[in-house]
Image: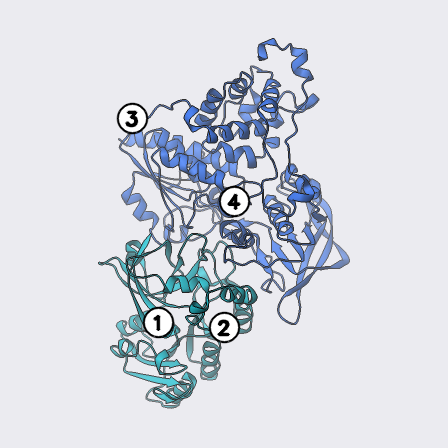
Amino acid sequence: MKKNLSHKEIMAIERVKMPEQDPQQRSRNFQEVNLGLSKQQAMREAQRCLQCKSQPCVDGCPVRVRIPEFLEAIAEDNLPLAAHILLKDNTLPAVCGRVCPQEDQCEVLCVRSAKSGPVAVGHLERYVADWAMQNPDKLLKQDRPEPSGKTVAVVGSGPAGLTMAGELAHMGHQVTVFEALHETGGVLRYGIPEFRLPKNIVDAEVERLERLGVTIECNVIVGKTLTLEDLTRQFDAVFIGNGAGLPMMLNIEGENLKGVFSANEYLTRVNLMGAWRNDLPTPIIQGRRVVVIGGGNTAMDAVRTARRLGAERAIILYRRSEEEMPARVEEIKHAKEEGIEFILLAAPLEILGDDKGWVAGLRCQRMKLGEPDDSGRRRPQPIEGDTFLLEADVVVNAIGTRPNPLLTATAGNLKLSPKGNIATDENCATNIPGVFAGGDIVRGGATVILAMGDGKKAAAAIDNYLRKSS
Amino acid sequence: MFEVLENDTLAPNVQRLVVRAPRIAKARKPGQFVIVHPEKGGERIPLTIADADPEEGTITLFVQAVGASTLKITGTPPGSPLLDIAGPLGKETDIENWGRVVCVGGGVGTAVLYPQAKALADAGNEVTTIIGGRSAPFIILANELGRFSREVLITTEDGSLGRQGFVTNALQELIDDPQRCPQAIFAVGPVPMMRAICELSRPYGIKTIVSLNPIMIDGTGMCGGCRVKIAGETKFACVDGPEFDGHQVDFDLLMDRLTMYREQEARLVEDLPESLKSKITKVKR
């Protein structure tokens, strides 16, 4: 089909627009915001790829998906082949197609970016992954690897751990994943809301790994139920991908008032425990006026969740300007469409309470931007004397997380960074032979795809290690 | 899945469950707890591990039904499973040889106290135990605690067993007696009881350890919902506790935060069938 198009015709195709649920409607429900492309839309969008020789998009992808190849297969209406290519390179494509910041990775490098906008790689990835999920009988057979006889323990079933497990299973190793919570997925389950990543997608991706022979054991807290030493004794190699699960506190007055949550607690109650559903018992405080502190994706997830739980006003309070916000552009755009208010260049000084111990509001400090800091973003500075009050009955702290010390506290000789992250070399190897680590426990708070990139890189390193040691 | 092997009634609405959980049984230390998620869609409930048998691979839990989810746990018959149990969580009890210690248990808190008291006795302490409750049926584990306690003092509010009054009356007597005055006190029970014990021991400067029970979800330090204030500093009870120096605890904050979901909890109980409502104990907070 594509062969019939001239270069001019290809260049004339406009970038597809992802169909979305109406903002008014979706701001009050938990159904997915992005509805997915139709087959026609997907084929047409895939035709926009110029199949350039240099393939800059692949370099932008932390797991190096062969993007032009799977796009070509879509354009040629060969979805089994597209799925085959995608699934080989990416363990969790249905997840990545939804939550990856493609605009900063593959798409930003697309040669079409400058003129007519990059090829919508993310949307197409999602399209193929969803098709694969719905058509398991049409998928091409993946070669079953020769069993290596080697065993690997993976700590944490988040994006790093699941990617690692899938990669190693493809290499023929016997993988056991240990998850601390009662459900799999880590941040994909407890952190990212249903309206951005439906949980049946996570279920399906996990089931696919189980069919590959991966064993997943929930309710095992490494550092408590088992120690790292137990794992190194019982397995040939260990990968630690247990995330940065410890919320940073604001350390201001009023932080322990009722109605003040860490984003982790707020989102866990809603996502993992289903507090948004009327038929489940775990409660949440449904604020009328909710203020979320922070400017990252987690802050956007929390504030959009608050809106869906019924908040009349759901407000982002961020100390820098919109330009410095770490959240994805798409998330900020979606939030605005849903009626989220943004109070920028302002930081909380104190959380105020009523006489019953509930949050009543915040006293905030207006800020201005000064010189760039270590992160390259301009440093916020208080404007002396310029403070204001903000009414709130729920406050969510989404300023970030730190590494959780549960595992590392019981692994005395594991080398850590000064901030408590696990120290690794460029191949994700720790100082203990056979023990590797990746994702947020190494990086601090980062993204799903960077964690997955670590999982993939570490899988290659572990495979190498196992083959050498046999 | 974690099979319930035994489930007996210990006191009105308090059940003793023996559950198969080999890894937890092996790793567990006194003072630690588990999180039980009884069924799909249920809540995650923190429960202290009262005892464990590493050889049999079992743990013992004492559970008081105080709401819909705890009722589901207490109602699980032998042979049936609890869906998820995660642990052991929290820090173990700091067991030292203090010399003379008094262990004070109130209501189902006595069950939480049991493993601590046993470990303290094993470490060479002279243990005196005080058990308090509303009335005779609520006094639990007196015989078990008696096996390693120098004496067991019982107080009931209605005088139906032991002395009429509160655990604080019995503790005051011990403190006043130079032969029996403790070097350390371990108290577990309703928050008002633990607070009263701490207020009583404070002027005497007797080290007093309490076990706190704030609202929790994950139990691994991930959410911070269980935060408590200790000596003016915010701590997470699930990873920094659950045991703390009682003289440093901000009990006002603890009690206040425990009321956060009172309305929602009441609604859940309201929705239960009448026959089950009687199986729930209203807790003093």
Query: Distance between the Cα atoms at labels 2 and 1?
Result: 24 Å
Question: Mark 3 sits on what residue?
Answer: A146
> Which chain's colour is cyan?
B
Dots 2, 3 in contact, CB < 8 A: no
Q: Can residue A220 be seen in this view?
A: yes
Is the C-beta separation of discs 2 and 1 under 8 Å? Answer: no
Judging from the image, what secondary structure is the residue with disc 3 in? loop
| Residue A116 lies in quadrant | top right
Kindly identify which residue carries mark 4: A444
Amino acid carrying mark 3 in the image: Glu
A413 is higher (above) or lower (below) than B262: above
Camera-nearest label, 2 or 3? 3
Q: How many numbered marks does the figure carry?
A: 4
Nearest the viewer among A368 and B213 is B213
Labels 2, 1: front one: 1
Chain of the residue under label 2: B
Chain letter, disc 4 residue: A
- Amino acid carrying label 2: it is Gln
Q: Which chain carries label 1?
A: B
* CA gap, disc 4 and disc 1: 40 Å
Q: Specify whether A157 is left or right of A365.
A: left
Which residue, given by chain and number where applicable, does mark 2 sit on? Answer: B248
Q: Are marks 4 and 1 on the same chain?
A: no
Residue at image mark 1 = B111
Specify whether residue B96 is in view.
Answer: no
How many C-alpha atoms fall within 10 Å of the one at disc 3: few (<14), some, or many (≥20)? few
Q: Are marks 4 and 3 on the same chain?
A: yes
Question: According to the rendering, which colour does chain A have?
Answer: blue
Question: Where residue A297 sits: x, y (%)?
Answer: 60, 43
